[in-house]
Structure formats: structure tokens, C-alpha cells
Image (cartoon, helix red, strand yellow):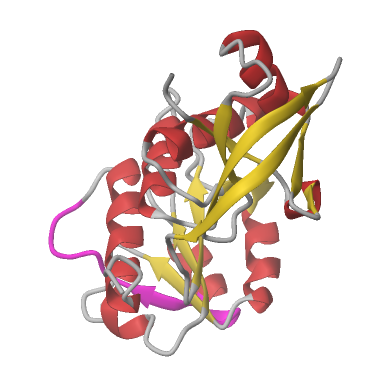
Amino acid sequence: MEIRRFFVEKSDILDGKVTLTGDEFYHMTKVLRYKVGYKAVILANDGIERLSVVDEIGKDYAILSIEEESVVDRKNATVTLYAGLLKNNKLDFVVQKGVELGVDNIVPFISQNSAETKFNFERAGKIALESAKQCGSVYLSRVCDLIDFDQVLDQFKDYDKVIFAYENERNNRIADAVKGGKNIAIVVGPEGGFTPEETEKAIENGAIVVTLGRRILRAETASIVSVTLALEALGELDYD
């Protein structure tokens, strides 16, 4: 049987034992029909794969024993993507690919040019979980609930670098803007981009406005290109 991957909180691991509950427990026991003695890879968002075996299955929990631990990935920088809400569920693509690339957090928001106002938080979380498992990641990106642009601005203070993609910028490049950063936010707008007024507010709150090149990109493409350029410049796509 294929050994499947399951995500838990670090607090679910104690003294070589793992407690699996919630949706991951349901997926293990009801969907995959796991039984005592089956093996699984347990992940706790810390770069470690834990090969484990199922010891006990209760009504709403499973207990596993860790047999082997392997450090398979590392992160030297934290990247949060603030992505403008998109029409026709296009944000699903952004979430999926953002997880594959390795962003730490994805925060959807609405701004002046947003054409969509509804966001399915639970759906996005499931897409993130499925994507992390499919691509073999040891990290699960956190998808946050929808906020507005003023809340985005308020959160700039939580980062040492805020990168703001703006189509009218011609000079500043992401590769230069992220240098020296360890906790980085990347902000990409919805269809229609940002207004000059929003861009000015972003600058006033400490953002570095950058260009994504001479071609106008779709919003979902801009998010993925921005993340890729930043992670590459930070060395987060390299092998050790």
C-alpha cells in the first residue's frame, strides 16, 4: 500500500507519538481505510518527514508511533502572498501554485478594483492541503480569511520587507527589493491592479513598489511570477 502523507500541528506530537484528529483523521480512516499497522508520513510544518505506524484508531482519533525522522527541507526566509480576490475562482489557481512554490501564507483581499467580494475560506484551505500532499511538500501554506485593503496596509508593519507589484513602475525589480529580507510580504492586486491612490498609501506605509517586467500579466499570473522571482532571489528554490 502506498504510504500517504498527513499534516498535524507540532503540539500533536509528544514523546514519539502522534495524535491525528479532525479532517486528516477522517481522510485516513474513512477515505483511505487505514487500519492498525499501516504506515504514514507525518508532517508538522517544520521540514521533517516522520515515518510512522498506526498503533490505535479510536472514534475520532488515531495514535501513531514515529519510527524514523528525516529532515528534508529548510527555510531561511518567510514569504507571505497578499493576493487580490479574483473572479471565477481564479484564486484557486493562485493558492495551488503558491503552495507548490512554498509560500508560507496566502492572504486574499479586496481593494478598489476588485470585481469579486465572496471568498470560500474552507474551500481554499482544502485546495492548499491537497496541493501540499500532491507535490510532496513538508510545509503546508496557511490560507487566511478575506480582508480589505486597509487591513493589508495595517499589516505591513509585521514584515521587514513589503513588495508591492504595480504595473506603472518601470525600474525597481523584485530581485533587488527582497535583498536582506527574512520576513517578506508580496502584494499583488486583483484584475485591474491598484489605483494610484492605493499605491501611494502602500508607499506611505513602507512598501517597495516593483515592476514585473514590460508585459502586462493576468492577476493570477502576476501572483505566481512575483512569488517565483522573490523565492529565487532569496535562494529558497535552491538545493542545499
Q: Quadrant of residue 59?
A: top right
Q: Quadrant of the N terminus?
A: top left
- Report the front residue among 170 and 71: 71
Q: Is residue 156 visible?
A: yes
Q: In the figure, 128 relative to 164: above or below?
A: above
Name the residue located 55 percent from the left edge and 47 percent from the top edge.
Answer: 140
Residue at 17% in and 65% down? 213
Which residue is pictured at 39% across the width and 33% down the height?
134
Residue 208 is a magenta residue: yes
Q: Is residue 101 magenta?
A: no
Q: Position of residue 168 (x, y in %)?
A: 28, 67
Asked whether 109 or 150 is in front, the reply is 109
- Whole-percent x and y of residue 112? 54, 48
| Residues drawn in magenta | 203-216
Tell me where residue 238 sits by quadrant: bottom left
Q: Residue furthest bottom?
A: 180
Does residue 105 appear anywhere in the picture? no
Q: Is residue 160 above or below residue 36?
A: below
Q: Quadrant of the C terminus?
A: bottom left
Outermost left residue: 214
Main secondary structure type of the part rendered in magenta: loop
What percent of the width, then of the height, locates residue 154?
Answer: 70, 68
Question: With 24 as the anchor, is 236 left or right in this view?
Answer: left
Looking at the image, which residue sits at the far right? 59
**Residue drawn at (27%, 69%), measured in percent from left and top?**
239
Q: Position of residue 230 (x, y in %)?
A: 34, 69
The reply, left or right, for residue 14 in relation to residue 147 is: right
User: Relative to 180, is 87 above or below?
Assistant: above
Q: Is residue 117 above or below residue 175?
A: above
